[in-house]
Amino acid sequence: MTQRSILITGCSTGIGRHCALRLHEMGWLVFATARSPQDLESLRSAGLTAVYLDYTDQQSISACVEAVLNHTGGKLDALFNNGAYGQPGAVEDLPTDILRAQFEANFFGWHELTRQIIPVMRAQGHGRIVQCSSVLGIIPLAFRGAYVASKYALEGLTDTLRLELHGSNINVSLIEPGPITSDFRKTARKKFLKHINTEHSFFQDRYQNRLSKMESDKPDRFELPPEAVLNKLIKALDAKQAKARYPVTFPTHLMAFLKRILPVTPLDSLLRKSGD
């Protein structure tokens, strides 16, 4: 059986690293991306083919694609767009350039990488594109506006792409995690302290409550390990006809259900309480 190949982004920690290592163990040829030299070396030491990628740099994206295709002879079976971060802060406190940076990393870079891979998959007659979204691609929470906006945009773009690729034998899926064990909260705290002026915000007191939660090492309620995402990724890669969406964790299933059945006012009330 021919070894299948996959490009996975955001493999320095968390979901990306775990999925890359486990698929490698399962016999996949895994191209794992990261930015820092230390992370790239760590991935290589684990037996992975590590490739530098910065979603915010188009030249980096093109160089990554070129490196992968040179290694595989111009083919790639699957792409798992995963690398992302969360920029906390109220919408009114969010500088527009910081919102733009969130979209460069969480949305525009994913789009550019995907559109460079699609012709490869069309030429070979098959492919799987899997996008790691979030429960916050389904519902919003206060003080997560930048991240929510990027994931809402991702959901819409991916749904459109699925329609456009119908009949191409390229399956397109969204994985929608809720709380997953990773460094996501630690990174979000750094971004919050760097970019949000808390002292002059209407929400100063509520920010202090949010900061204390971000500083805590206590797992979120219903938090699952990255293996839970891997299980959904394997289904998206192996299914004869992949599903459009693969929710992960109880909050994702619950919020998707409540969004379908609740009117806006009671749902907003619930989301306001959940966001504190």
Image: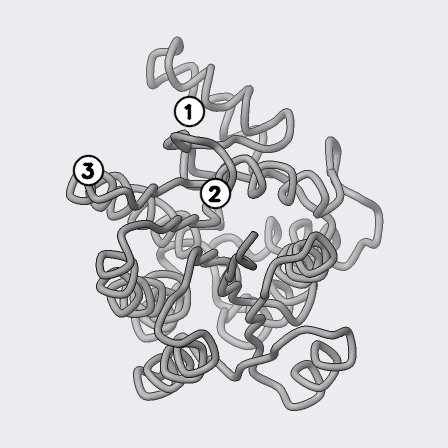
* Foreground residue among 81 and 100: 81
Left or right, 230 with reference to 167: right
Sequence-wise first label, 2 or 1: 2
Label 3 vs label 1: CA separation?
35 Å
Residue 142 is marked as: 2
Q: 207 or 271: nearer the eye?
A: 271
The residue drawn where x is 63% and y is 42% is: 229
Q: Secondary structure at mark 2?
A: loop
CA distance separating discs 2 and 1 = 10 Å
What residue is shown at x 43% (from left), y 48% (from top)? 130
The amino acid at mark 2 is: Ala
Residue at the disc numbered 1? 268
Secondary structure under tag 1 reads helix
Crowding around mark 1 (Cα neighbors within 10 Å: few <14, some 14 to 19, many 20+) is some
Mark 2, Cα crowd under 10 Å, few <14 / some 14-19 / many 20+, is: some
Select label 3 or label 1 by which is in front.
Answer: 3
Residue sitting at 36 percent across and 83 percent down? 66
Residue that carries the numbered disc 3 in the rendered image: 166
Residue type at mark 1: give it.
Asp
The picture places residue 98, in percent across and down from the top left corner, at: 38, 72
